[in-house]
């Protein structure tokens, strides 16, 4: 995966006064860290990967209005969470404000132009999960048909988004993001832990915003959907000491009380 960034302190598409950086991220690399500081401000990026996904964290603070152009070498299917800041994102000419504390699922095409406008002195940070095809193909058996639509766009080389406008990040989503961030400290079990959390994160992004009619026969049964909502309620009530995945999966609880 290769990213190219152009930091432009002038208007979009103007050539002058820019700094170019190319990041060549080898998929064999498990960890990657990039930090750039200049008179324009600072930009930081961390990427950590498992066999099934790449976890990305970005943060920046610029002293002027800055535009970052992003070119990718291959199509990307990713979950995106804007934790701080309110940049303007343009994907193939479609412009949208990415509000703070909001999330979406994106398909990005390398042949189409993407850029983001950042306002001066607006601290921005985001969290993302780039999903491998093998992971998506597996979880598509358990998701509503509406997610399959954006995935088919991705497979056809088209850009798009799951939500027309980003939707608000819930407290349970923030908790899962924090758990994924710390998951790389777990040693030999980190990959299984992170990938299970990523699956839960995808469920929380999608399932609360679809109706039962969107589930095809091969997708989740109503009993499974009810259990997911019940698990979410339990996590909300036990935010300080969240239950383990094994406890939730085995149903070792009564109502909203973990035993």
Image (tube, rainbow, N blue to C red):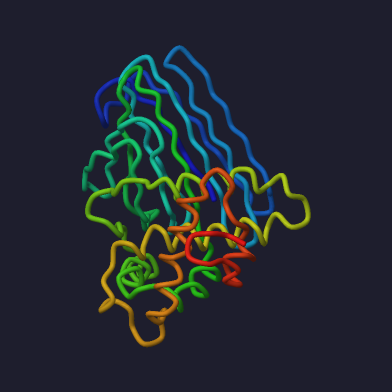
Q: Position of residue 112 (x, y in %)?
A: 32, 52
At a point 61% along the width and 72% down the height, the residue shown is 250
Seen at 41% across and 37% down, the residue is 83
In-image side of 21 versus 62 (left or right): right
In front of the other: 56 or 5: 56
Please tell me whether residue 218 is drawn above or below residue 34 in the rendered image: below
Residue occupying the point 40% across, 53% down: 110
Total labels: the figure holds: 0
**On-image quarter of the C terminus:** bottom right
Q: Is residue 75 in sight in this rendering? A: no
Could you say where residue 213 lies in the image, as x and y percent from the top left? 25, 79
Tell me if I can see residue 169 in this picture: yes
Compare residues 19 and 224 and report the one nearer the observer: 224
- 25 shown above or below 11: below
- Image point 33% across, 79% down: which residue? 215
Q: Quadrant of residue 243?
A: bottom right
Q: Nearer the viewer, residue 241 or 189?
A: 241
Q: Residue furthest right?
A: 188
Q: Nearer the viewer, residue 19 or 32?
A: 32
Q: Residue 188, position in %: x, y?
A: 78, 56
**Image spot of residue 79 (x, y percent):** 43, 53
Q: Residue furthest top?
A: 39
Residue at the extreme bottom of the image, as rendered: 217
- The answer to whether 46 appears left or right of 109 in the picture is right
Q: On the image, which quarter does residue 251 sit in? A: bottom right
């Amino acid at each position: 995966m290769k990213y190219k960034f152009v930091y432009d302190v002038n208007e979009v598409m103007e050539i002058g006064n820019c700094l170019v950086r190319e990041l060549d991220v080898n998929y064999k690399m498990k960890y990657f860290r990039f930090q750039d500081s200049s008179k324009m401000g600072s930009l930081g990026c961390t990427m950590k990967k498992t066999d099934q996904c790449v976890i990305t964290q970005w943060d920046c603070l610029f002293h002027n209005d800055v535009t970052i152009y992003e070119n990718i070498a291959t199509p990307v299917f990713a979950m995106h969470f804007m934790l701080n800041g309110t940049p303007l994102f343009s994907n193939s000419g479609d412009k949208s404000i990415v509000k703070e504390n909001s999330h979406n699922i994106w398909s990005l095409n390398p042949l189409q132009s993407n850029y983001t406008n950042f306002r001066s002195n607006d601290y921005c940070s985001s969290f993302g999960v780039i999903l491998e095809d093998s992971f998506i193909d597996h979880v598509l058996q358990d998701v509503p048909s509406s997610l399959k639509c954006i995935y088919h766009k991705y497979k056809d080389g088209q850009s798009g988004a799951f939500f027309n406008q980003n939707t608000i990040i819930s407290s349970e989503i923030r908790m899962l993001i924090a758990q994924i961030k710390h998951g790389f400290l777990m040693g030999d079990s980190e990959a299984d832990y992170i990938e299970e959390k990523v699956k839960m994160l995808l469920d929380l992004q999608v399932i609360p915003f679809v109706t039962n009619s969107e589930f095809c026969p091969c997708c989740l049964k109503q009993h499974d959907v009810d259990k997911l909502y019940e698990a979410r309620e339990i996590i909300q009530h036990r935010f300080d000491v969240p239950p383990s995945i094994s406890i939730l999966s085995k149903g070792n609880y009564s109502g909203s009380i973990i035993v």
